[in-house]
Image (cartoon, rainbow, N blue to C red):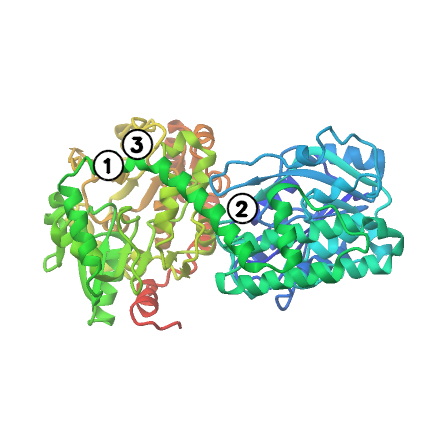
Amino acid sequence: MTLVSFVVPAHRVQGWLRECLDSILGQPFGAVEVIGVDDASPDASGDILDSYAARDPRVRVVHLAENVGLGPARNVGLDRAVGEYVWFVDADDWLAPDCLPEVAERLRATRPDVLVVDHVRVGWNDVPGRSAMPGVFPEPPGEETFRLRDRPAALHLLHTAWNRLVRREFLVDLGLRFAPGWYEDVSFTYPVMLAAGRIGVLDRVCVNYRQRRAGAITRTRGERHFEVFEQWHRVFRFLDEHPDLAELRPAVFERMIWHQLTVLGNGERIAPELRPAFFGRITADYRRLLPPGGYRPPDGVEGLKHRLVAAGRWRTFSALRAANQARATARTTTRRALPVARRTARLTRDVLLREYYRTELRRPIDPTLAVYAAYWYRGYACNPAAVDAAARRMAPHVRGVWIVRRDRVGTLPPGTEYVVAGTRAYYRALARARWLVNNVNFPDFVRKRSGSVHVQTHHGTPVKVMGLDQQRYPLGAGGMDFAGLLRRVDRWDYSITANSFSTQMWDRAYPADYTTLEVGYPRNDRLVRATAEEVRELRDRFGVGPHERVVLYAPTHREHLPRYRPPFDPQRLLDTLGPAGRLLIRSHYFHDRDGRARRRSHGRAADVSDHGCVEDLYLVADVLVTDYSSAMFDYAVLDRPIVVYAPDRDAYQLARGVYFDVTADPPGAVALTFTELLELFRSGAVDGPEATAARRGFRERFCALEDGHAAERVVRRVFLADPS
């Protein structure tokens, strides 16, 4: 028998949905079902739900034809639930490991109408906050159930649907549904708690409540926050319909005023021009819904706020709020004063140039200037180069200028306009460009000007975790400044992705309000369009004969082990390949940060780490051997054999973290030891039927957009403002 039905509505949550579902389905408890409700989500949320349903019979999916909102979507799931209890879990939150057996044990032991579980807020920095339970229940709440009139303090537990399990038959008998609109939890959880005959509290953190940087209503300004008033009116209508609950009216009233003031006090919800009207609505509710016998307001400053609401004194309330904010700002300024003084004392040439940059920021934006950069100014490369080439054809009014390190100027194609990083021309270009295109982030000092457009092209489909997700893998994060990272991400206007998977991962790794252009990778256009003649010419340039088989070995970098090199013996591989075999070895670009390229060749093995254009190497190679590198996604465009060689798979996944296991869902054959790698080539399994089938599935999943026109789509959208 199904004990718990999880109802998981999904709308624009593709970056977090997998983690939510995994946290439920991975619990050591099987008597559950998951009803995923695709609320007409415009992203890949529906596809993700379908993929889980295809491999786990406990998952059922409902696809809605139009977006109905969180409350009605929960109702759809509730109508299909068969479990004894229903748990409404938000798709961007996740359950604590191994919590469900304890939840099930409490449900079976006490049979409550409602079981409230503990939770913690988890910020974008992945640091959990403190439990709110001790503030409500200074003493452990115990296992006994109770009615709300016996322990009205339970109303102070966060009034969300996802931190409580509700007995399904109790809900059906009560006839309670989620209302449409924002703050739908209010008009559901309060009536549930008021009507419940048996309430239980489990003093165990079961839910991780994600504090999203972007996309959540708690971080969205607008008039829809006024919908909180109607949700509270529904609660009081419920009280009117149940006069036996009148003694709880004062406690509910206090919670209403507290909640409405909380919404008002959040600057990310109520814009300044709307605050007087919002305050006026609170005062109106105060006067209309005040219980006949009054209520007990809180102590201290909070109590003062209640009295100001009762009197309708907005100006005094606003002045009190401003004074509190001023005190907080003064404390912050004092803390920062010492570092600022130290920095000011270290005036250098860079500081003077930054001042020049700030001066240039006051000049008009050049409406024709596009500034390009790639790999920390290493030269003309990757997606920015492909976008630049397409822009020159399609948008000749755009003047493209590249930023390059002084030691890489010689690698630029003839005729490329450029500025050298660190010069006055560099700062001037950054200050005045209308478009700034990069496959990594520009430096922290670069400001996002009104009217400028920042395009983040990225430089690969992510296998290893990136961005904020690296906080869970501190060994691989290498002391990253995540707050600084988010300031850089907030400059993005567009994020270019090659496939739906990348879009989903960037959404969670880099949460901000940019627009995703899921169009394919511009750098891969060349691979799609390459002719047989071009490939022959490249192979001739590399000295490769028409009947030689070229293996490209391109491992990724281990940030947590900078000196690590996978066990690899070039000569033994060449012996296995035979006399017609050739080997090209390319290190990750991190290994060339100091500008010292490797130029070692040994017979049929050549180190090509200094070759500027990796697409040349892809076209020359007959087989790619790699590990966790995004190279596999680009090379798969060519539909040639790929081998995943991952001798440190378990250690890498533990220390660096991966979004998916490329040895479980590979683009071809897999080897975990060098001996296995040799055997794959010796036996012919490298391009055998099993490897070919794996590559086909991999290409369908990750390369469907690679049609040779990705750069053109970017240019039309970014430079020509064509939304098609």
Q: In this figure, which residue is indicated by the disc labeled 2?
A: 211
Q: In this figure, which residue is indicated by the disc labeled 3?
A: 573
User: In the image, is 411 to the left or to the right of 263?
Assistant: left
The image shows residue 579 at horizontal and vertical percentages of 24, 36
Q: What amino acid does circle 1 point to? A: Arg
User: Within the image, what quadrant is residue 98 found in?
Assistant: top right
The image shows residue 558 at horizontal and vertical percentages of 35, 32
- Residue for point 78% across, 33% down: 105
Q: How many marks?
A: 3
Q: Nearer the viewer, mark 1 or mark 2?
A: 1
User: Within the image, what quadrant is residue 531 found in?
Assistant: bottom left
- Helix, strand or loop for disc 3: helix
Within 10 Å of disc 1 (Cα), the crowding (few <14, some 14-19, many 20+) is: few
User: Within the image, what quadrant is residue 129 found in?
Assistant: top right
Q: Are marks 2 and 3 in contact (CB under 8 Å)?
A: no
Q: CA distance from mark 1 to mark 2?
A: 33 Å
Q: Earlier in the sequence, mark 1 or mark 2?
A: 2
- Helix, strand or loop for disc 1: helix
> As displayed, is residue 723 above or below residue 378?
below
